[in-house]
Image (cartoon, helix red, strand yellow):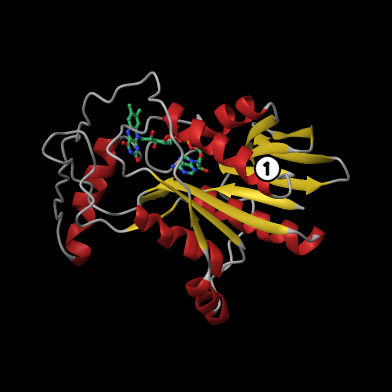
Amino acid sequence: MRILVCVKRVPAPGSRINITSDALNVDAAHLGFTTSPHEECAVEEAAQLVELHGGSVCVLTVGPAEAEEQLRYAASVGANEFVLIPNDTGHDWDPQRTSHVISEAIVALEASGEPFDLILFGNESADSGGYQIGVRVAVTLGRGVVNGIKGIEVLDNSVTASREVDGGNEVYSVPLPAVLGVKEGINLPRYPTMKGRLASKKAEITFTTIESEPGAQEKVRLHQPEEKISETEILGDGPDAASAIVDLLDELGVL
Ligand SMILES: Cc1cc2nc3c(=O)[nH]c(=O)nc-3n(C[C@H](O)[C@H](O)[C@H](O)COP(=O)(O)OP(=O)(O)OC[C@H]3O[C@@H](n4cnc5c(N)ncnc54)[C@H](O)[C@@H]3O)c2cc1C
């Protein structure tokens, strides 16, 4: 089977996020970048499905040239084909535009090779978390889509996909080709082996430019929330602090 996984280059968790002086972009100057956990799991799931059923994993990203790093990471953990659609073109890349070029890229990739049986997205992107791209792409391509997936089983002509709900699981049967939004926890992503890391350096990345119209959204400005400063009060030292702790617990109403 042929599986496509869409990943996004996002600021690494824990990075201090600064905004550019025009308040329109995140200042990437001192940021570390990564792939979001949902998408790491999507790549792992695709690799496991291909190990089970045979086939190949293609990974696609819409991002700056540096997003090559995220594609090479995917190569080090089992993906075989890589597509980078540059978005450092000076346009505003709202979700409508992003999903449009992903859909166009999928049509082109399928026209020049095998169709994708399965297209995996993360449940939501780790930075802007709009929950839009997978659904928009699936609707454009006319394929069934389910989000929040924590279990995938591929059958002959369909996929069984399950997601957690309060007190149980919902299980969907979706005809192939299908689109699924994967959630962290579906698996434990592997670490790259030394062999995988070396192979990833040689992975061939296809850079594809796709013309696109702006979507209906316009970015007005990004807002940086005020930093919350937390204060620490030291109640005392050793056994001498015991009565102060009891008083505090009493005040908090937990005694
Ligand atoms: C008005 C506006 C202007 C913007 N301008 C820019 C801009 O100029 N440059 C820019 O980088 N961002 C820009 N953004 C942010 C960008 O649109 C979104 O981050 C991106 O489209 C993902 O949308 P989302 O948050 O809805 O993703 P979600 O729908 O939450 O993501 C779901 C899944 O879709 C996949 N996915 C999401 N984004 C990508 C991607 N880029 N490549 C491959 N797969 C992906 C991933 O699998 C992800 O887990 C802008 C956003 C708005 C609203």
Residue 114 versus residue 169 in the image, above or below: below
Residue at image location 25% in from the left, 56% down from the top:
31
- Residue 26 or residue 160, whichever sits in front: 26
The reply, left or right, for residue 23 in relation to residue 186 is left
Look at label 1 and name its amino acid: Ala
Residue at image location 39% in from the left, 18% down from the top:
216
Residue 234 versus residue 62 in the image, above or below: below
Residue at image location 37% in from the left, 43% down from the top:
87
Q: Which residue is mark 1?
A: 111
Question: Looking at the picture, how far across and down is residue 81, in whole percent?
Answer: 60, 59
The reply, left or right, for residue 247 in relation to residue 201 is left
- Residue 176 or residue 87, whichever sits in front: 87
Residue 19 versus residue 199 in the image, above or below: above
Q: Is residue 12 visible?
A: no
The reply, left or right, for residue 248 in relation to residue 54 is left
Question: Looking at the picture, how far across and down is residue 213, in whole percent?
Answer: 41, 26
